[in-house]
Amino acid sequence: MNEQLTPLRDRIDSIDEEVLRLLNERARLAQEIGHIKNGPIYRAEREAQVVRRLQAANEGPLPAESISVLYKEIMSACRALEQPLSVAYLGPQGTFSEAAAVKHFGHAVTGVPCADIDAAFRAVERGAASFSVAPVENSTEGAVNRTLDLLLSSPLKICGEVKLRIRQHLMRSVEGMRGIEVVYSHAQSLGQCHEWLGQNLYGVKTIRTTSNAEAARLAAENPNAAAIAGELAAEHYDLKIIARDIEDEPNNTTRFLVLGNEDAAPSGRDKTSLVLSAKNRPGSLLELLAPLAGHNIGLTKLESRPARKGSWDYVFYMDIDGHRTDSNIQNALHAVEEQCTFLKVLGSYPAAV
């Protein structure tokens, strides 16, 4: 067997050395580009284009998702040679928000864990972080209302999105499920695991926490407690995963928004997010949607929230296909603006890779 393995391993060693040489050559070219342009080191549209192009050219056997992960880490490491990015997220360490930040920006960033979503927004607004990553909706539990409310008032722009497959695990400081008296988790996670808890831990008290990582921290302090959280939280707090993938829906996914001081340039496959309010009269919402259909613009999301400025007044959040600089979107928004009482473009950004 060694006679068969040795030449194959030698070829792998040779390829590894060539890959290493090429990676460093790429890094040097990235440094040169950074010195020439003397501008933002993170370009959301450029990185999306790189990943999409390589996924399209990929002949396997590596899957497209692996290509995305590998090249985001390569771009992250190259960026860090110039200036490390700082990314604020709902903390503490070990949350799904941290996992989303790593998925989007790679590991070569400085994480800024925050006490709540508000603090993550404020960190970017006051210059304490370069970007923020905030959850905005879950495929089973719906919208994250606090993020929507902050988008209405914050000067930050949406410059990216991340879709993260949420895998919920039950964890505690000791093995087995015997003796669990309380389960800690974020309200969204408790909702996502409601049926599993009813079948497997019926009658056990559940307590909501500000984050899944905070739940893991509390479980680490009490051998009679368990937490529902992700794998990162188990690693951070040295907990044993006693039941994996306990979410009720197998394709449970959370969408996160990347927020910064500027939105992104066109990438070729983009979204634009808006928030607006309609005049208080019959058919007003239909009047707002008609220009989108008239200019052949796809509407991918429509969400309503109380406007908080009067009884029964609402604002509507929309995601549409395309970039705000596209002529058809500019024309449609001009027509929409004539029909509404308030319109704010929250940002244009590459659709999640």
Image (tube, grey):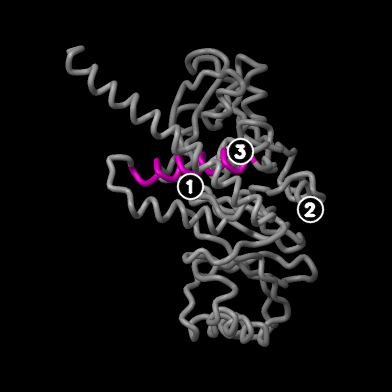
Would residue 91 appear left or right of 227 to someone viewing this image?
Answer: right
Q: How crowded is mark 3: few (under 14 residues within 10 Å), some or many (20 or more)?
A: many
Image position, residue 307 (x, y; %): 73, 67
Q: How far apart are marks 1 and 3 (CA)?
A: 15 Å
The residue closer to the viewer here, 30 or 172, is 30
Task: Find numbered disc 2 in the image and state the secondary structure of the residue it sits on.
Answer: helix
* Type of the residue with mark 3: Glu
Would residue 124 appear left or right of 170 to someone viewing this image?
Answer: right
Tell me, for residue 125, which label it has, or none.
2
Label 1, on which residue?
253
Image position, residue 243 (x, y; %): 45, 25
Marks 2 and 1: which is nearer the front?
Answer: 2
Can residue 89 be seen here? The reply is no
Q: Residue at x 76, y 61 (%)?
A: 155
| Secondary structure character of the magenta stretch overall | helix
| Mark 1 in CB contact with mark 3 (< 8 angstroms) | no
> Up-down: is 178 above or below 118?
above
What residue range appears in magenta? Answer: 63-81
